[in-house]
Image: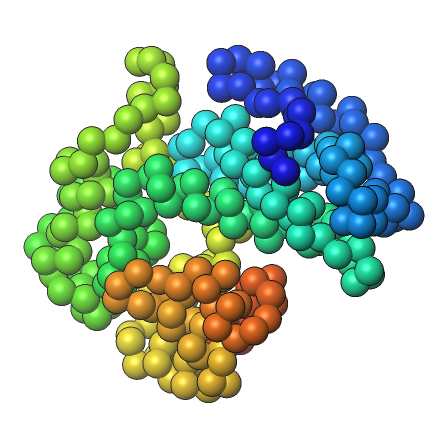
Amino acid sequence: MNATLSLPVPSSAGSIDQYIQSVNRLPMLTEQEEVDLAHRFRDEDDIDAARKLVMSHLRLVVAIARGYLGYGLPHADLIQEGNIGLMKAVKRFDPDRGVRLVSFAIHWIKAEIHEFILKNWRLVKVATTKAQRKLFFNLRGMKSSSNTLRPDEVEAVASQLNVKSGDVVEMETRLSGQDIPLETQGGDDEDRFAPIAYLPDPHAEPSEALATAQMSRLQDEGLRDAIAKLDDRSRDIIQRRWLSEGDTATLHELAAEYGVSAERIRQIEAKALKTMRGQLAHIA
């Protein structure tokens, strides 16, 4: 479908503001208009109907993409990837379920942006083990200054997060940008905006519950106790999404395994993380 749609394209060459103004002027659809267009596309393969559905929700993509600017990637690229997710959502949208397209599309837009970030931000790629994930999300917040950690501070962080001292030193080096080249997005004036200088937006990922300051003060046994209180399905999803030593499972992989939608897996994951945060708050 994306190959046949003619849509405005955000550019990283200076017209991003013009693009945003343009999509914000596009008319929004009423619920009945949305249902009628979705039926035309599904039942009659009406590409023009699909185009109208996509166009009316481009402003949603802009809003969601803005929440990921902290990763240091161009806003235009994030929007473009989100638009791909929006088109996938329109293709799969069922107007007979009684759910508005905006609610259904959010997952697909975020999923596409997540994939783009993981493919393009090298720092995320190196934080793949359990220890690295804990350090990646917590080390900056645990440092009292921008100076390199002293040996005693390294030992304190390692003890607090129950990881090896060597892992602390290695992640601090990576966060300092000393052992991996990170490309900037422009000239000298933008050097300070390289991805290494940013922390993840705490509101952009469902891992927020595991990345809070409370979590950084807990030992592994506290986390294990919280996970143990989850039901079997929720526990499996959390372990495979966030605590896997190797490649983590995607929402779509888990959805196929459990025979539900990816959005349902995301809801279960979010509820489990919220439950764990509440339990961990009492023992922190």
Pick whichever, 244 or 45, lies toward us.
Answer: 45
Number of numbered callouts drawn: 0
87 relative to 190 in the view: left or right: right
Where residue 230 sits in the image (x, y, percent)? 48, 83
Q: In this rendering, is residue 157 above or below 56?
A: below
- Identity of the residue drawn at 34% across and 34% down: 195
Q: Estimate the x, y position of residue 157 in percent, counting from the top left.
A: 21, 61
Residue 199 spot, x, y in % from top left: 38, 43
Q: Is residue 260 above or below residue 94?
A: below
Seen at 13% across and 64% down, the residue is: 164
Q: Which one is nearer the viewer's eye here, 169 or 258? A: 258
Residue at position x 38%, y 70% in the image: 240
Quadrant of the rendered structure where residue 7 is? top right
Give the image location of residue 226, x and y in percent. Answer: 42, 81
Q: Is residue 25 above or below residue 280?
A: above
Q: Pick the residue in front: 184 or 146.
A: 184
In this rendering, is residue 226 above or below 81? below
Q: Residue furthest front?
A: 44
- Snapshot colouring: rainbow
- The reply to whether residue 192 is visible in this rendering is no
Dividing the picture into quarters, in which one does residue 235 lie?
Answer: bottom left
In this rendering, would 202 be left or right of 119? right
Q: Determine the residue located farthest toward the right in the rendered image.
A: 32
Residue drawn where x is 49% and y is 80% of the image:
233
Foreground of the two, 152 or 23: 23
Q: Quadrant of the C terminus?
A: bottom left
Is residue 39 in view? yes
